[in-house]
Image (spheres, rainbow, N blue to C red):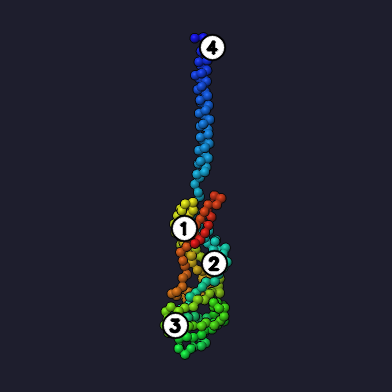
Amino acid sequence: MTKQTKLQLFCTMYGGKVKSTKKMFALGAIGFLGMGMLLAGCKSAPELTQTDALKMIQAYYDQAPAAAANITVNDQGMGQGVVAKYWAKTKVYPNRFWADFTLTPEGKKTVKLANGGELIQWRPETPNDPHYALVMATVAANHMRAHDIKDIQDVGDTKTAMFTEGVNLDGVPGPLQEIAHNPGNKLSSAKTATFVLDGGAWKLQSVK
């Protein structure tokens, strides 16, 4: 075997290995880069705690305009209002169970009637009608309150949490708060908040 033949054989064997090694390094580098991009894309979302979720929900309520609370006043509530001197009976009708009441100066600072006036027309169907009631609004205006949030659940790309939406009676006098707790009043309801990722952080999307 001549020297030229031996040189060609060496280049064929080891040159090919060098080229294959270079290709392997190149493919390895591409694979490593692709894996890094994949891991970056699969970066886990930040944690959403119940405390942070409740803060976002309350901020949602605080940004809404303050509003009066509606209070249902039944027969028991009418009597409590008379004792509290929010209204006074000014007329009794022949059937003896219809009556008119007029808001007192203290009452005008406490409640607002649906018709915007000061005359309460009490018109039940029977003397002891258990279903008859009138709705009045508090003069005090407040923001709703969120409390008692439940465990946060993953729903697709979003997170949801159930909580209690409650009427805020801050600034409402004690006697009227007692009336607000009589049967017929609903001071709280169950709601569901939905959160979405926005710029790498959780954001409140809706309250329903």
User: Between residues 7 and 60, which one lies in front from this camera angle?
Assistant: 7
Cα–Cα span, label 4 and label 2: 95 Å
Residue type at tag 4: Gln
Q: Residue at x 53, y 26 (%)?
A: 22
Mark 2, residue position: 143
Residue type at tag 2: His
Q: Earlier in the sequence, mark 1 or mark 2?
A: 2
Mark 1 vs mark 4, foreground winner is: 4
Residue type at tag 3: Glu
Q: Earlier in the sequence, mark 2 or mark 3?
A: 3
Residue 189 x, y percent position in the rendering: 46, 66
Cα–Cα span, label 3 and label 1: 44 Å
Mark 4 vs mark 2, foreground winner is: 4
Q: Residues within 10 Å of mark 2 (few under 14, many from 20)?
A: many
Q: Residues within 10 Å of mark 1 (few under 14, many from 20)?
A: some
Q: Is residue 68 above or below residue 161?
A: below
- Check contact, mark 4 vs mark 2: CB within 8 A: no
Element type where label 1 sits in the image: strand
Mark 2 vs mark 3, foreground winner is: 3
Cα–Cα span, label 1 and label 4: 80 Å
- Check contact, mark 4 vs mark 3: CB within 8 A: no
Cα–Cα span, label 4 and label 3: 122 Å
Mark 3, residue position: 125
- Check contact, mark 1 vs mark 2: CB within 8 A: no
Element type where label 3 sits in the image: loop
Q: Residue at x 52, y 12 (%)?
A: 5
Mark 1, residue position: 161
Answer yes or no: is residue 83 visible. no
Q: Earlier in the sequence, mark 4 or mark 3?
A: 4
Cα–Cα span, label 1 and label 2: 20 Å
Q: Earlier in the sequence, mark 1 or mark 4?
A: 4
Q: Which mark is residue 4?
A: 4
